[in-house]
Amino acid sequence: MTSLFDPIALGDIQAPNRVLMAPLTRGRATREHVPTDIMIEYYRQRASAGLIISEATGISPQGLGWPYAPGLWNDEQVAAWRPVTDAVHAAGGRIVAQLWHMGRQVHSSVTGEQPVSASATRTEGHMHTYEGRQPSETARPLRLDEIPGLLDDYETATRNALAAGFDGVQIHAANGYLIDQFLRDNANFREDIYGGSIGNRTRLLREVTERVISVAGAGRTSVRLSPNGDSQGVNDSDPEPLFTHAAKLLSDLGIGFLELREPGPHGTFGSTDVPKLSPAIRKVFAGPLVVNSDYDTAEAAQAVIDSGVADAVAFGRTFLANPDLPERLRTGAPLNPSDPATWYTRGEKGYTDYPALETEAVAA
């Protein structure tokens, strides 16, 4: 049987184990979205992951509305990311950059402009801003003549990621952000070539992936989808045909791996009664399939690998609080709990001060 701790080829990236670090927004960059020195140590500490998927990283000012999140659209950001990737590599790790356009999930006080989306829709509730949480705003539909510029932004961010030393990139097409807003029928009411049929609604996903592959190569390109249930107000009336079609087109493009965020009915950070689609997606996606959401123990992660549905598991909050998570899972050592109050704060507390096993042993 394949073990959680066996190596795996994720496209062109050779991972030493199947314990991946999921993308985790932490808000430790500058207000200008430039990575900071504290991020070097944070990622270095977690280099024992089979692969680190970076926190979601903006491809453009238009698409990045999370306060203090990093970007990859200018030279200053590239230069600041380089010590992070160097530190991960020096510690024996591998890291890819997750490329992010938030679509309507932003506020104009952060981006400086009205949010954009597939259609003129609005997310219920409030958005994080530098001035605290503010009511969400109605997005304007992206015009057809703006799509080429969006694809250019993905290309630029991919080139910048490679220049910054990342081993590849992941396209964030999940969690109710821009590409997901094009995919699902409660957010996409377009009547042009990007709306209506499943083939049209997956067109942007295909075009973005093709553009990223043209720069990074298919083996260093991956995608994240969230196929089951509501995600930040974005949902679909018939998700299985939509997401199996999306997975098949990604398989045909030969991407390095596909990651699925699939909460269950008792999820600790989002829940849904919509069944997981990973079994159906497994049938049409030929490459490595990575699952994510509430696999908090080695036993749970091993079980999904044993089932044949997944080839690896991405851990989020568990990796946040346990920088040496693969070793803790392998040995059955206790896990540190994470502190939600520090998930998005600015300092070292709850960021780089979670102890590793060797630190705990010395303290004892």
Image (cartoon, rainbow, N blue to C red):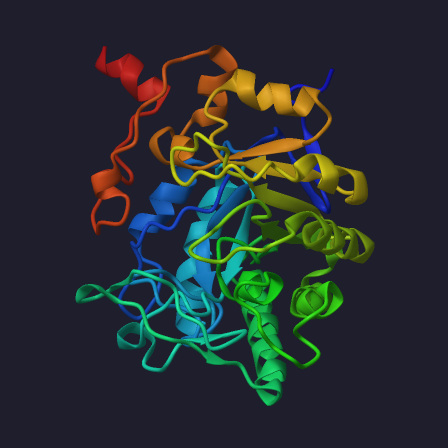
Question: Which of the pair 289/90 is nearer the observer?
Answer: 289
Q: Is residue 87 visible?
A: yes
Relative vertical location of residue 123 with respect to residue 242 in this rendering, above or below? below
Q: Is residue 81 left or right of residue 169?
A: left
Relative vertical location of residue 233 with respect to residue 276 in this rendering, above or below? below
Relative vertical location of residue 187 with respect to residue 27 in this rendering, above or below? below
Q: Is residue 29 left or right of residue 151?
A: left
Question: Which of the pair 144/95 is nearer the observer?
Answer: 144
How many marks on residues? Answer: 0
Question: Which of the pair 214/140 is nearer the observer?
Answer: 140
Q: Residue at (61%, 72%) from the top-left corner?
A: 155
Name the residue at the bottom extreme: 145
Relative vertical location of residue 342 with respect to residue 172 in this rendering, above or below? above
Q: Residue at (78%, 52%) from the top-left corner?
A: 248
Q: Is residue 243 left or right of residue 96?
A: right
Question: Which of the pair 13/315 is nearer the observer?
Answer: 315
Q: Is residue 262 left or right of residue 321?
A: right
Which percent across, then down, holds residue 27?
Answer: 30, 54
Name the residue at the left extreme: 131
Which percent across, then down, holds residue 187?
Answer: 52, 66
Which percent across, then down, holds residue 169?
Answer: 59, 56
Image quadrant where residue 156 sits:
bottom right
Which percent across, then down, holds residue 250?
Answer: 74, 55
Is the C terminus in the top left, top right, bottom left or bottom right quadrant? top left
Q: Residue at (38%, 64%) from the top-left corner?
A: 123
Is the N terminus in the top left, top right, bottom left or bottom right quadrant? top right
Q: Is residue 167 visible?
A: no
